[in-house]
Amino acid sequence: MGRVLRVPRGGLKHLSSLEILHGFEHAIRPLFLPGPRNKPQQPARDLTKHLMDHEGVLLMPDVMSHLYTRVEKHTFATPQSRRKCWGILLPDMSPTPGTSITLEVKPKWLAQSPNAPPGAIRCRTCAMHVSVPKKRDNYICPLQLLHGNSSSLLPWSQATVSEQFDSNTGKEARPSPAVIAALVKALVDYLTISDGLALLQHLLNLQSSLDPRGVLCRPKSNAEAFDHNLRLAMTLRDCSMFIKVAYDKAGVTGIESKLGDLDFKSAEKIVDWMDKERGLLLDGSYTKGVKEGPVCWLQRGLGV
């Protein structure tokens, strides 16, 4: 069918499919539709092609019973095999060996946190990597992803594309060096001069306009609008950008991207976001020496 089925896990903190569908259609999708030029949250052209179409589908008990036997134990919080359940059909962005690769990029915070201290030498995302060290294979600072040129993004693109084939055990699926070079160039071009750049710039505009003050500046009263916009901004900071590049023996034949993980964040997470921001400030993650954590785009000119 060219689509994948998403089924809710059923836990207390997990959104139901109907909640996900409602949030996507009424809160997320409108942000990618064209609007008046004086509204920074709206793009000048329709960018919904970068969104995954969400189609609700009612799964009958016998279908749920089958799914329940196909997953690891405790995947579902409750035995869902005895009841109906709404699922969501999404486009399948999986790669096809020999004809396409799919790269997952996490844009994260494309602008500095409004609550970052003066003199910060790393962005919000890189600061989190200092506070909570993570695996950094092929990590790229979000600000570099957005503002970098062809030469600065080339090493990351080469490593990212090569990884797609290094993990493939079938040597017959590995294209020629010329095709790999074409894939690398296509990815760089997509993110620096093509649709990928336009999408990243729109995400930047959304994040900045929806959260101009930062979570630590939450008003003590009448915070409904602030909370709503903050939840939208944080949703867009936690999404994934799936880039699918098609190719044949002659080179690249097409490239597209879709945003995933766009479930509208719950207001219950606001306290956690505030705690994380305070933690970054208290442990000095924004300002610690440049030798700690990954290289941030803000550190240009600091001798690193």
Image (tube, rainbow, N blue to C red):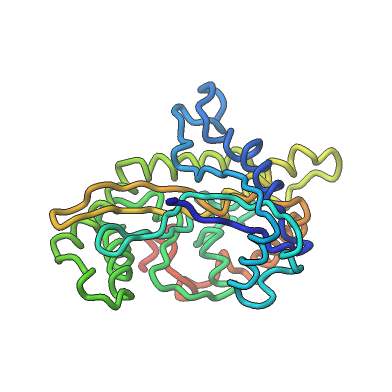
| Above or below 122: residue 223 | above
Q: Which residue is at 68% across, 51% downward?
A: 86
Residue 103 percent location from the top left of the image: 38, 60
Residue 214 percent location from the top left of the image: 67, 49
| Above or below 28: residue 272 | below
Q: Left or right: where does residue 135 sit relative to residue 185?
A: right
| Above or below 255: residue 78 | below
Q: Residue 9 is drawn in which quadrant?
A: bottom right
> Which of these two is toward me, 296 or 104?
104
Q: Left or right: where does residue 96 sit relative to residue 17?
A: left
> Which of these two is toward me, 299 or 274?
274
> Which of these two is toward me, 145 or 93?
93
Residue 116 percent location from the top left of the image: 61, 56
Q: Residue 226 is drawn in which quadrant?
A: top right
Residue 258 percent location from the top left of the image: 45, 48
> Which of these two is toward me, 143 or 163?
163
Q: Residue furthest right?
A: 221
Q: Residue 56 is drawn in which quadrant?
A: top right
Q: Which residue is at 68% across, 45% downward?
A: 230
